[in-house]
Image: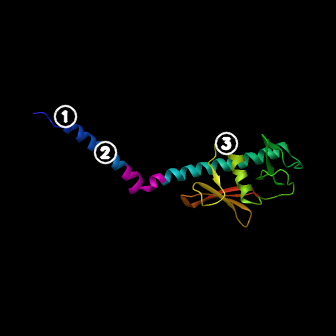
Amino acid sequence: MASALTSTGLKSSQIYFAFILLVIVGVIYLLLIKKPSAADNIVRQAFQLNSSAFENGIYFANIRFLTKNPDRNQLDQWLIGKVGLDYNQKGFPIGTDIEDFDQQTPKTSENCRQIWQFILGPLQPKLHLSKKNSGYWTYLNEQNVCIYQRDRLNKMILSYHSETGRVYLTK
């Protein structure tokens, strides 16, 4: 007596197809519908990695400023192509507007975006200036702190305080 699962007929092909389809639907259900936290965890971990890279980049930029400019009399010195990173008197990045020598903090959200792009380089996640677009977005708050957020992570906020150079992630 031959089993229906081992025969090569049309009926067994349909049974295998139905089984595979059920497994795929089950996995999708478990990962995306039943446990959306699995997908959110991936987004959360990516944001944490970007925040760590950003923090290390700010630290590196400050060290580079201090070692290249120990008397702190020349602010705009790190150029990549035609874009230069602008520093304040303490050596922390404040944007890429290297024409304004008296600027000590970012003045606009665009300055925050410039810092993000310069520090993280060409592989950084695309950063928008408003929450309307999906993905990463930034704004400058009233205390001149750059705030970076991810649209799917309302509670996770990356903040950069240019006066102290502090980068911190709140969860």
**Residue bearing mark 2:** 21
Percent coordinates x, y for residue 138 in the rendering = 66, 58
**Residue bearing mark 3:** 122
The part of the image, by quadrant, that contains residue 151 is bottom right
Q: Amino acid at mark 3?
A: Pro
**Residue bearing mark 1:** 9
Q: Earlier in the sequence, mark 1 or mark 2?
A: 1
Q: Residue at x 83, y 44 (%)?
A: 77
Crowd band around label 3 with a 10 angstrom C-alpha radius: few (<14), some (14–19), many (20+): few
Tell me the distance, in whole angstroms, between the alpha carbons under discs 3 and 1. 55 Å
* Helix, strand or loop under label 3: helix
**Mark closer to the observer (3, 1):** 1
Is residue 13 left or right of 64 when viewed as pictured?
left
Q: Earlier in the sequence, mark 3 or mark 1?
A: 1
Q: What are the residue bounds of the magenta stretch?
A: 28-39
**Mark closer to the observer (1, 2):** 1
